[in-house]
Image (tube, rainbow, N blue to C red):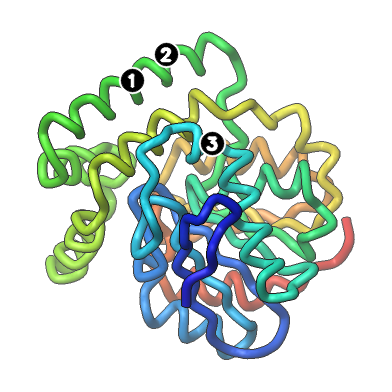
Amino acid sequence: MFVTMRDGLRLHVRVQGTGEPLLLIHGFTGSIEAWGEGSLSGLAQAYQVVAVDLVGHGESDVSPDPARYGMDEMLMDILQVLDSMSIDRARWLGYSMGGRIAIAGAVRNASRISSLVLESASPGLATEGERRARRRADEALAEGLLRGGMEEFVDHWMGLPLFATQGKLPPGIVAAHRERRLRNRPEALAACLRGFGTGVQPSFWDALSAIELPTLLLAGEEDRKFTEIALRMADLIPGSTLRLIPRAGHTIHLENPFAWLAAVRTFEPSQP
């Protein structure tokens, strides 16, 4: 189904299962399909799964305006989707960029969240110098995307060291994942890099200690960078639970879906 936003853009939303609502927020270049049919079906056995294609991704509408991809706008989109379904509170599960949105929700709209699952997520870059350098890098990436097109960009993106562990996956899975990414539109991804790159968002490191939601942190054991981030976050979020998933890098739900699904479904939130 599609939900019309305050400015007329439509977001594609998929709902399946019954029970406590579980909101899924995908990563950059991702979509509802990127979670995998097995993962969606497995979650739907325990929850009412609400999966969203973020603006400019999947089957949702595109805006060429980078401001439309800002964190506040993305967060308002998520809340409007929940409102359209009369869902007051839900479990939020965010992967990578989606995890950054989920963290923003936990800081700014905690009353809408019953518990939090953060997969390979970061609260942002801690210093202005780091953010400035990342903005320059993302601007260059956006320019290159618009010049070179989707195939060149997707091959570059999937070749980043962050995704090197996906090389161990069966070729058919890698090819299907690449094909899903190629369905995105260059003007949308370029605007997203400019409007919601890590260098643009505020740092939430100092706000983590104020999160009072039951929180599960997931990181792949082979993703050294985000394992270190998850360890730091676990020290700061009161009562949080950290699970390091074996045989997985950054995209845990793709690289070890059975362990990912088990970790999410067995997480029993208790107030920190």
Q: How crowded is mark 3: few (under 14 residues within 10 Å), some or many (20 or more)?
A: many
The residues tagged by marks 2 and 1 sit, at their Cα atoms, a distance apart of 6 Å
In terms of image quadrants, where is residue 140?
A: top left
Q: Which residue is drawn at 58% across and 70% down?
A: 263
Left or right of 192 in this view: 21: right
Give the x, y percent position of residue 145: 20, 34
The image quadrant where one finds the C terminus is bottom right
Q: Residues within 10 Å of mark 2 (few under 14, many from 20)?
A: few
Q: Residue at x 74, y 48 (%)?
A: 106
Q: Looking at the picture, does residue 238 appear above or below residue 114?
A: above
Left or right of 145 in this view: 237: right
Query: Which callout, 2 or 3, points at the residue further toward the start of the chain?
Result: 3
Mark 2 is on which residue type? Ala
Left or right of 34 in this view: 71: right
Q: Mark 2 points at which residue?
A: 133
Q: Which mark is residue 137?
A: 1
The reply to whether callout 3 and callout 1 are in contact (CB within 8 Å) is: no
Mark 1 is on which residue type? Ala
Q: Nearer the viewer, residue 258 or 62?
A: 62
Q: Is residue 248 visible?
A: no
Front disc: 2 or 3: 3
Give the x, y percent position of residue 217: 63, 53
Q: Residue 70 carries which label?
A: 3
- Image label count: 3
The reply to whether callout 2 and callout 1 are in contact (CB within 8 Å) is: yes
In terms of image quadrants, where is residue 192?
A: top left
The residues tagged by marks 2 and 3 sit, at their Cα atoms, a distance apart of 18 Å
Residue furthest toward the front? 8
Q: Which mark is residue 195?
A: none
Q: Can residue 192 be seen in this view?
A: yes
Q: Is mark 3 on a helix, strand or loop?
A: loop
Mark 3 is on which residue type? Gly
